[in-house]
Image (cartoon, rainbow, N blue to C red):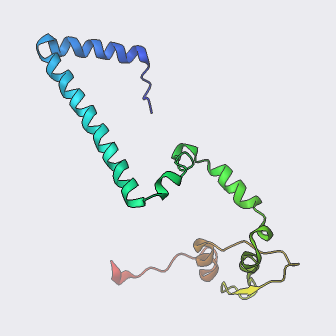
Amino acid sequence: MSFGLTFDKLIIIAVIAVFLVGPDRLPAYAAQLARLVKSLRSMADGAKDRMREEMGPEFDEVDWKKLDPRQYDPRRIIREALLDDPGAAGAGAAGAAAMAIDDAAGAGAEKPVSAEQPVNRYVESAYETRQRKLGKGRPAPYDVEST
């Protein structure tokens, strides 16, 4: 988020700021900026120390680069989730993954499915459920007394 600011533009802004502030107030503002940077650095170090104190030895074991939000790629996460082999996770996960929605009942009841049958992973959205219950094209119910 550089807002289109290049190094040249920042230098021009700094030079204009120096002229506007003037030589009399410039040392005071520079000292105030230095204090602000020091206080921000001490707050960050304090938060890091507190986190290390509360988490204990597990703090050093955490891979912080893996938790960096800049590494977040929703396409990769979805691809890995879809290509994940459910049989590799174990028998408990295979039993949980073998639950399918009973489309005939339409009530969202689940039934166990054998390993040979494909698993229906489609879940009806709230909009589709409402449309199915109301009938397509009919308006939603409206209560005149509620308004």
Q: Residue at x 14, y 21 (%)?
A: 28
133, above or below 21, in the image: below
20, above or below 75, in the image: above
118, above or below 53, in the image: below
Res 19 → quadrant: top left
Closest to the observer, 103 or 30: 30
Q: Where is residue 75 in the image (x, y as percent from the top left)?
A: 66, 50
Q: Which residue is drawn at 21% across and 21% down?
A: 30
Res 131 → quadrant: bottom right
Res 9 → quadrant: top left
Q: Residue at x 40, y 82 (%)?
A: 143
Q: How many labels does the image show?
A: 0
65 left or right, relative to 56: right
Closest to the observer, 145 or 70: 70
125 left or right, relative to 43: right
Q: Residue furthest front?
A: 57
